[in-house]
Amino acid sequence: MKDREPAEDVLGLLGRKAGDYVVVFGSCAQGTLLALQEQFDMESPLALKSATAMPGIALRGETCGAVIGSLMALGMAFGREKPEDIRSVVRTMGAARDFCRRFEDEFGGCMCREVQQKLFGRSFDLADPTEQVEFVKAGAAEKCRIPAETAARIAGRLIIEGQGKSD
């Protein structure tokens, strides 16, 4: 399976880069998105900027930013540019559902609070400054790179494979 080896190498590097960017940005959404954008030549400063408020949907414990950054990248890779391009919608939604299933298998859900529960044994109210401090002390920088690395590898594999089944 020589064809799979380079893909595995690329996915490993992609995951590490996403994790590194999470530490730099302090944002799972931006870190994941930027790594995918760079890897697949989809760089867009405006898209990266738009991911600023996405970790846990404005730190509310909702959808994990690594999920959002990955879904944004899948949209960039497969999404439609014209309203009548339904095929691209079907392809993108198929890839997005596949991504979410794989991420859920790893972390028990796509919600930030569910991912935190898996990583920390509890969730934090990141809108509360006291809880933010506890989150950082609990090792947020290193632990939150894990879902970003995983998400980038899953999305990267889907992009490499041209995934997007309409199941």
Image (cartoon, rainbow, N blue to C red):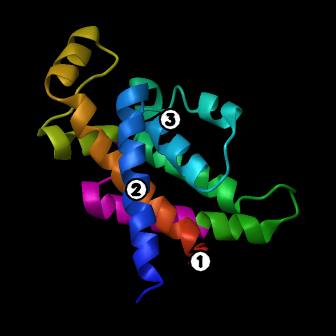
Q: Nearer the viewer, mark 3 or mark 1?
A: 3
Q: Earlier in the sequence, mark 2 or mark 1?
A: 2
Q: Disc 2 vs disc 1: Cβ atoms closer than 8 Å?
A: no
Q: CA distance from mark 3 to mark 1?
A: 26 Å
On screen, residue 95 above or below 25: below
Q: Position of residue 140 (x, y in %)?
A: 23, 30
Residue sitting at 62 percent across and 28 percent down? Answer: 49
The numbered mark at residue 165 is 1
Q: Amino acid at mark 3?
A: Gln
Confirm whether the magenta stretch covers residue 133.
no
Q: Position of residue 43 (x, y in %)?
A: 67, 43
User: Can residue 151 be seen at all in this image of the molecule?
Assistant: no
Query: For mark 2, what is the residue?
Result: 13
User: Can residue 127 be seen at all in this image of the molecule?
Assistant: yes
The numbered mark at residue 30 is 3
What secondary structure prevails in the magenta region? helix
Horizontally, residue 99 falls left or right of residue 38, namely left
Magenta residues, start to end? 94-111
| Crowdedness near tag 2: few (<14), some (14–19) or many (≥20) residues, C-alpha within 10 Å | some
